[in-house]
Image (spheres, helix red, strand yellow):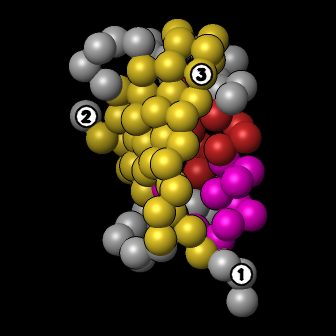
C-alpha cells in the first residue's frame, strides 16, 4: 500500500488571472489527488491543500513550480502534515 500524505502549498508570483486554479484542478484530477485550491486576497498568491499517495502528491507539487502556461511562479512553500482523509475530490474554492 502506498504511503498517504497531506501537504499545504503557498504559491507566489503571477498566479491569479492566468488559469492557475483550473490547471491545478486538472493536474490534481489527473493524478487522483484530493483537496482544494484558492486565490489569496493579496492578489499575488494561491493556496492549496493536497491529500493522497505520496508519489502523486509529490508529482503535483513538482507541477506547481511550473504552473499553468500563462503563470510565472516565483516561489512555492510547502508544509507537510499527516494524512487525514478529509477530502474526496479536488475543488476550486472561492
Q: Secondary structure at mark 1?
A: loop
Q: Are marks 1 and 3 in contact (CB under 8 Å)?
A: no
Q: Which residue is mark 1?
A: 2
50, above or below 65, in the image: below
User: Residue placed at 65% from the left, 44% from the top?
Assistant: 61
Give the vertical position of 20 relative to 18 (above or below). Answer: below
Badge 1 density bin: few <14, some 14–19, many ≥20, Cα 10 Å = few
Name the N-terminal-most of marks 2 and 3.
3
| Residue 92 x, y percent position in the rendering | 37, 42
Indicate which disc residue 94 carries. Answer: 2
Mark 2 or mark 1: name the one nearer the start of the chain. Answer: 1
Q: Secondary structure at mark 2?
A: loop
Q: Quadrant of the C terminus?
A: top left
Q: Magenta region: which residues?
A: 50-60
The residue that appears at 48% across and 73% down in the rendered structure is 83
Mark 3 — residue? Answer: 75
Numbered circle sitting on residue 57: none
Q: Closer to the camera, 78 or 37? A: 78
Residue 31 visible somewhere in the drawing = no
Amino acid at each position: 500500500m502506498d504511503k498517504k500524505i497531506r501537504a499545504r502549498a503557498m504559491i507566489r508570483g503571477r498566479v491569479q488571472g492566468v488559469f492557475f486554479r483550473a490547471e491545478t484542478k486538472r493536474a490534481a484530477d489527473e493524478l487522483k489527488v484530493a483537496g482544494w485550491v484558492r486565490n489569496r486576497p493579496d492578489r499575488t498568491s494561491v493556496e492549496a491543500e493536497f491529500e493522497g499517495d505520496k508519489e502523486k502528491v509529490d508529482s503535483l507539487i513538482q507541477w506547481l513550480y511550473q504552473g499553468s502556461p500563462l503563470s510565472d511562479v516565483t516561489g512555492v512553500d510547502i508544509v507537510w502534515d499527516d494524512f487525514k482523509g478529509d477530502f474526496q475530490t479536488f475543488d476550486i474554492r472561492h
